[in-house]
Amino acid sequence: GAGVSQSPSNKVTEKGKDVELRCDPISGHTALYWYRQSLGQGLEFLIYFQGNSAPDKSGLPSDRFSAERTGGSVSTLTIQRTQQEDSAVYLCASSLRGTGVGTEAFFGQGTRLTVV
Amino acid sequence: AQKVTQAQTEISVVEKEDVTLDCVYETRDTTYYLFWYKQPPSGELVFLIRRNSFDEQNEISGRYSWNFQKSTSSFNFTITASQVVDSAVYFCALSETSGYSTLTFGKGTMLLVSP
């Protein structure tokens, strides 16, 4: 597709359930990022994938959060045993290379997660 | 550690006014990149500009202009003759090159342009 695609766009889940969020990056982009946007916290980095390198997981808030990127393309962010504080918009972005070499990141429209 | 500060939480202007959004950053790197993104009500972050730390030339793109001043660690964004469609949250972000390739965002400035 032309842009970064995320699904679902909205997800309501019960506390304690697991959820999976999907991101389809722009074709050919080697770098993929997950961010979380919540009220009062702004945009927080979660995890970064670059090519076949080990991901940078330094932003994941707890071991309930994990992500994988299969075949260097689609990525899935999994949250286990969801808590109400996990409610946020989860944004995925991709860039041609890492943004540290000056390449802009393109963002998807996000998945709004509500934990009830 | 890097940090981006957008001191203005919310700005309200009337259409056709000029408005400047402030951004101040902190980094220990000598080489870094600065970005501005726009987030309209639809929610998607839209890339506006990227500037590297070696290029202090101001840039103009239509009604948008950016003023990068290394001496004050600022990268301010001005919208000239604002329009209602400019209403959005604007984020300033920093990316360092020393091994850490992700974006550090400011908290954002909500701009409301009324007719």
Image: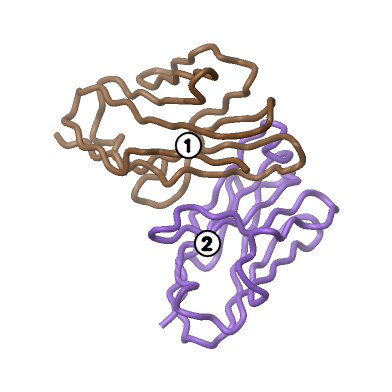
Chain colours: A purple, B brown
Q: Which amino acid type is marked by label 1?
A: Cys
| Residue at 58% in and 46% down | A3
> What secondary structure is marked by label 1?
strand
Amino acid on which the number 2 mark rests in the picture? Tyr
Q: In percent of the image, x 74 and y 56: which residue is there? A: A56
Judging depth in this view, the residue of B114 and A54 nearest the camera is A54
Give the mark toward the camera: 1 or 2.
1
In the rendered image, residues at marks 1 and 2 fall on the same chain: no
Residue on which the image places disc 2: A90
Which of the chains bears the disc numbered 1?
B
Vertical comparison of B101 with A59: above or below: above
Q: Which residue is mark 1?
A: B92
Q: Residue A63: x and y, percent?
A: 67, 75
Q: Position of residue A92 (x, y in %)?
A: 59, 55
Residue at 58% of width from left, 78% of height from top? A19
Q: Residue furthest right?
A: A52
Which residue is at the front of the view, B63 or A73? B63
Query: Circle 2 marks a residue in which chain?
Result: A
**Which image quarter: residue A98?**
top right
Classify mark 1: residues with Cα within 10 Å, few (<14), some (14-19) or many (20+). Answer: many
Where residue A7 sits, quadrant-wise, is bottom right
What residue is rendered at 76% in x and 46% in y?
A30
Task: Give the image location of residue B71, x and y in percent.
Answer: 52, 17
Helix, strand or loop status at disc 2: strand
How far across and how far down the image is residue B50, in percent?
Answer: 57, 28
Q: Determine whether A98 is above or below B76 in the image.
A: below
Q: Is residue B107 above or below residue B27?
A: below
Name the residue furthest top.
Answer: B57
Q: Is residue A87 left or right of residue A64?
A: left
Local crowd at mark 2 within 10 Å, few (<14), some, or many (≥20)? many
Which quadrant is the C terminus of chain B positioned in?
A: top left
Direction from residue B21 to residue A68 in the image, left or right: right
